[in-house]
Image (cartoon, rainbow, N blue to C red):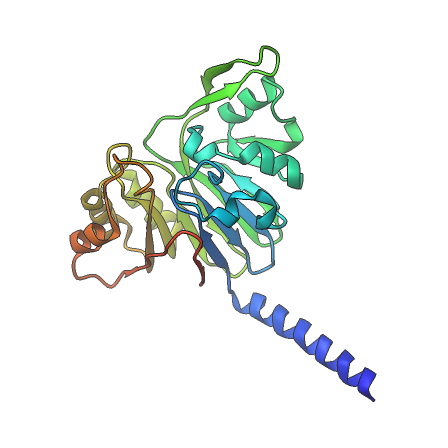
Amino acid sequence: MLGRLFSFVAVSLLLLTGAAHAQGKPELQWFAQSAFKLTTPGGKVIMIDPWLTGNPKTPPEYKDLDKLGKIDLILVTHGHGDHFGDSVELAKKNNAPVLGTAGMGQTLQVLGILPPALSIRMNKSGTIQPFDGVKITQVHADHSSEMVLKDPATGKDGSYPGGEPVGYIIELENGFKIWHMGDTGLFTDMKFIAEYYKPDLVLIPIGGHFVMSPKDAAFAISQWIKPKQVMPMHYGTSPVLKGTPEEFKAALGNTPVEVIVMQPGDKKTF
C-alpha cells in the first residue's frame, strides 16, 4: 500500500509539472547587462548574451559556469565581449550550439574556435525551430559587431568581423513572445517589428552611450512597441552606462505597460 502511495505521489508530481509547462510558465533569470537564462515551458534552456565571468554585476555564484546547469542553446546578439562573453566555453561544456549571424559563425569556424555543428549561421528575418514549439527569429538592431578573439594558430588577439548586430524574437511553446533587442539605438522599424511579431515582453537596453538612453527607450516603448511588459537591461556595468530603471520609468510616464525591474541573479516566471 505504501509503495502504491509513493508511486501515486510521484506520478501526480510529474503530471503537475507537465501541467505547469502546458499552462505556459517560462522562467527568465537575469545576470546583468544583456545576459539571460531562459527556461522554456517545455524545459529547454537558452542562454542569451552570456557575459558572466567578466561581468562585474553577475553574482559570484554564477561566475562558476557549472552552476548554470544544462544549457541547450546559446543566442548571441553581436560580437562585443560583453555579449559574446563565455559563449565558447558554455558551448563546449554543454555541446550547445551558438546561434549568431552568418558573419559571426563564419569567423568562429574559419579561426577554428568552434566547429560548424556548434556555430549556427543565419541572418535577419531567418527563423529556426530548435525545439518542438519554439521559434527563434533574428531581427534588426542598430549597433556594431566587432569581435576580439585569439587566433589559435598564432596565440595572438585580433579584431575580426562579427557579422551585423541583431535582436531576437523568441516564441515559446505556449505562444509567449520575447523580444531581446540586443544593443541598439532608435530606428523606426521597431514599430514594424512590434506590429508584425507582437512581442509580449521586451528586453530593452537603457544605459546610453553605446545604446539607447532611458528617454530613447521610453519613446520606443510608448510610441512604437507598446508591449504588455518591458524589462530594462544593459545599464550600470560601466561608468558610461548611466541610465537607470528609475529614469526609464519616469520618462515612460503613465502607461499600461508593466515595467519589470530585476536585480542580477533574480528569476521571474511569466
Quarter of image, res 93:
top right
Q: Horizontal and vertical percent for residue 101?
A: 49, 30
Please determine whether, in this image, residue 79 is positioned above or below residue 95: above
Q: Horizontal and vertical percent for residue 265?
A: 44, 53
Residue at horizontal 45 percent and vertical 19 percent from the top: 161
Q: Residue furthest front?
A: 60
Please determine whether, in this image, residue 75 is positioned above or below residue 198: above
Q: Horizontal and vertical percent for residue 266?
A: 43, 57
How many circles with numbers are drawn on the protein?
Answer: 0
Viewer-nearest residue: 222 or 126 = 222
Please determine whether, in this image, residue 89 is positioned above or below residue 134: above
Q: Residue furthest top?
A: 154
Q: Please give left or right for residue 252 compared with residue 68 in the image.
A: left
Q: Please give left or right for residue 140 compared with residue 161 in the image.
A: left
Viewer-nearest residue: 196 or 108 = 108
Q: Please give left or right for residue 267 compared with residue 1 in the image.
A: left
Residue at horizontal 19 percent and vertical 50 percent from the top: 247
Viewer-nearest residue: 144 or 241 = 241
Q: Please give left or right for residue 205 compared with residue 48 in the image.
A: left
Residue at horizontal 17 percent and vertical 62 percent from the top: 254
Quarter of image, res 190:
top left
Task: State the quadrant of the C terminus.
Answer: bottom left
Viewer-nearest residue: 221 or 194 = 221
Residue at horizontal 57 percent and vertical 35 percent from the top: 98
Task: State the quadrant of the N terminus.
Answer: bottom right
Q: Residue furthest bottom?
A: 1
Q: Horizontal and vertical percent for residue 199?
A: 38, 53
